[in-house]
Image: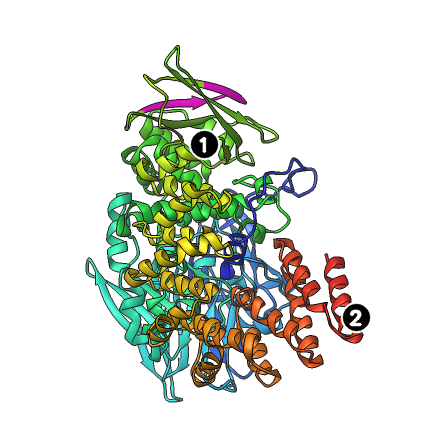
Amino acid sequence: MTKAFLLSLGLLGALPALAQSPTARPDSAATLPYRETVRKVNALVHTKLDVRFDYAKRQLLGREWVTLQPVAYATDSLRLDAKGMDIKSVTMVNGTDTKTLKFDYNQEQMLVHLDKLYTPGQQYTVYIEYVAKPDELKTKGSEAITDAKGLYFINPDSTEAGKPRQIWTQGETEASSAWFPTIDKPNQKTTAEISMTVPARYVTLSNGALTSQKNNPDGTRTDTWKQELPHSPYLFMMAVGDFKITKDTWRGKEVSYYLEPKYAPFAKQIFGNTPEMLEFFSQRLGVDYAWNKYAQVVVRDYVSGAMENTSATLHGEFLQKDARGLLDAEYANGESVIAHELFHQWFGDLVTAESWSNLTVNESFADFSEALWAEYKYGQDAGDAHAYMNMRNYLRSPADAQKHLVRFHYADKEDMFDLVSYQKGGQILNMLRNYLTDDVFFAGLKKYLTDNKFGNGEAHQLRLALEAVSGQDLNWFFNQWYFNSGHPVVTIDYAYDAGRKEQAVTIKQTQPGQVFQLPMAVDVYVNGKAQRHQVVMRQATQTFRFPAASKPNLVNVDADKVLLWQKTDNKPFAEYAYQYKNAPRFVDRREAVAAAAQLPPTDAAARQLLLSALSDKYAGLRLSALSGLKLDEKAVQKAAAPAIRKQLAQEKNTNNQAAMLLALGELGDKKDTKAFTQALNSQSYAVQGAALQGLASVQPKQALAKAQALQKDANGTVAAAVAAVYAEHGDASTWAYVRDQFDAAGPQGKFQMLESLVGFMSRLNDATVLNEGVDRLQKLAVQYKKYGVDEPILAMLDKVQQNKPADQKAKVQAAMQAIKQAQ
């Protein structure tokens, strides 16, 4: 699963990096309960469901035949999870013989009293008639999965114009038991058969193969899907709606994409790399994709990012784009999610985490796969850049630095879906891959998957598999990275001894707690040639000495750029400049750009590096260089403007084009009017929106007229740009558009519109504008206060209240006080 809207990624990326705090770990046994793996009394064997839907009541009418067997000890009872249901009857079924069974039910679990004592391995089948009522559940979601009612009716009464009528399910973590009774734990595995009776005009999707379709006299149709290989209950899925199916194949297996009809023409553009991903992952892992088909469906109002249901992944609507939107689709917000969920079909579905404490063997691998696919498909820079982004997002979260990767102490299982299980775990796998080498690492993954297929896994089994193929003891690695918290925080200092012809590198770990053992490569560049040295840091402070005939041009510590650490690298900028030109990895160049951006704008060498990086071979680094230029400085403006214009003329990436147009807009030079006007004709939403804002900086009346012309059909970036132009140059009559666009935007869209909102509120002395704007800023600041959003919003509100009448000033001050007091 990908985290819901990944707010932590987008927002935290804009916040300063913070070092670890030496405060007590929030996962400490002293404060949080121990979460043991749930004991298996009975094991699921087969689950057969026959369901129909009451759209008006938002209920599921279900019949279930569940086959089980005792695991270790004889038992005469069965405990099933069943949330908020009406249980009509429970019956023991043995061929044609049936017996009504007594049961106790507390709206969370049902305890079934079996008809006799069953011994280990002796199978029995219980038949249950029930009604699931998900909309009546008193459930609570989390940051990662915002709701937990399991079954969702979308626009069931068809009252929302333009919105499709859909049904879909979401099982992770333990919400499948909101729509069918089961043992809702990841250490259970069962084969399945699901029959859905739906209005005949709709399409259905579930796990496994569609084995039959039967038209009924009442205008409904019953579709039966069979999953003949065992998987965990949280991976069961159903989707019902007016989807159009686009079909592909891989090695004779069906690969299909379910989209709303208006997006179906773009299915191959959105999902078309899936067969190639299936082939690449199968070959790289040495384990073929196991399931009999692979389908992907996009649904409305999904409660997370996406979900890896066995053979049938469900995606949120962010993946659904038209041809114009696809021009701006970036890997990190689209294709990486497709790779992530597909990799789960091995890590999560084929081998499933034994407990939520071991979520890392699901999610860390899926996170790792995003960079793995990018590297294969788009090159080493793309893979490195994606891994680096994910690692930096983890490093910006001090609270997450205090958590173990394998975590047996937590308040709620949903807490496991965080930057540790995902981003930190993914980078740990990158380090392990680098340390063991590709052949050994992937051979270890093959053994882990083969030994545990259709069963469960945990970090220890992963370690044992990697040890078996590598011949190495890896306890040290797993103890420090999987079963402990934090990461190294280091300073690196350099000294060259001309007399001894020796380069010294001193690395000091300053984090609280354990000292990390860190294998790493160090490249020493002398006279333009690099000499590689492999070293291992084992002490809190350690000095390494390397022969060097003359003072090195560069000493590149962690030359493979894989270590998960927070470093202060005390080398002179001249070495960073050399690193940019000569070191081979994306992160080498990214570090040099970051170092240049930290220097004063008067530093000519730093400015020159940033200008050179505007034409870097990797699009993301070109964008980083642009961001590093301090365009509010006259000297920088004079040097940068020609370079930006030159790069814009040859730039292929539409999001970079948009950023460059916005940068030129900051300069406010009327000679760019033609470039803005031409870019308004772009098919890219991002470019058109940026061009509109750029035009507003040099020709405001012309831009205002263009905004009004674009308003009717504007969406996404263009709509935000129209709002920005109105905020800067519109009057009170255009406020409603800005406000409504803000309300309709997702979390990240709201953050992007903050400047427009504040600009409007500051510029106009209108009580309605101020009151409605303040209310929205206050709500946003409180909702995301723990991410540090409150501080910038407080600064914005302070700016807004200046030169306001007393009553408006009082409104702003009350909001600021409420934000400060919010928990």
Element class at badge 1: loop
> Please, which residue is most extreme toward the top here?
499
* Residue 133 visible within the image: no
Q: Which region shows up in magenta? A: 532-543
What's the residue at 67%, 43% (across, down)? 32
> Please, which residue is most extreme toward the bottom here?
218
Q: Position of residue 574 (x, y in %)?
A: 40, 34
What's the residue at 44%, 62% (across, down)? 663
- Residue 463 lies left or right of residue 775; in this view the side is left
Amino acid at the residue labelled 1? Pro
Q: Is residue 542 magenta?
A: yes
Q: How is the image coloured?
A: rainbow
Q: Which mark, by number, is residue 572?
A: 1
- Residue 683 lies left or right of residue 593; in this view the side is left
* 739 or 305, nearer to the observer: 739
Vertical relation: 727 (above or below) 319: below
Mark 2 and mark 1: Cα distance apart in space: 51 Å
Amino acid at the residue labelled 2? Ala
Q: Quadrant of residue 241?
A: bottom left
What secondary structure prevails in the magenta region?
Answer: strand
* Residue 239 visible within the image: yes
- Residue 56 lies left or right of residue 715; in this view the side is right
Vertical relation: 783 (above or below) 583: below
Q: Position of residue 240 (x, y in %)?
A: 41, 75
* 678 or 260, nearer to the observer: 678
Are circles 2 and 1 on residues that touch, CB within 8 Å? no
Q: Position of residue 794 (x, y in %)?
A: 68, 60
What's the residue at 38%, 41% (across, down)? 587
Looking at the image, is mark 2 or mark 1 earlier in the sequence?
1
What residue is shown with label 2?
A: 810
Element class at badge 2: helix
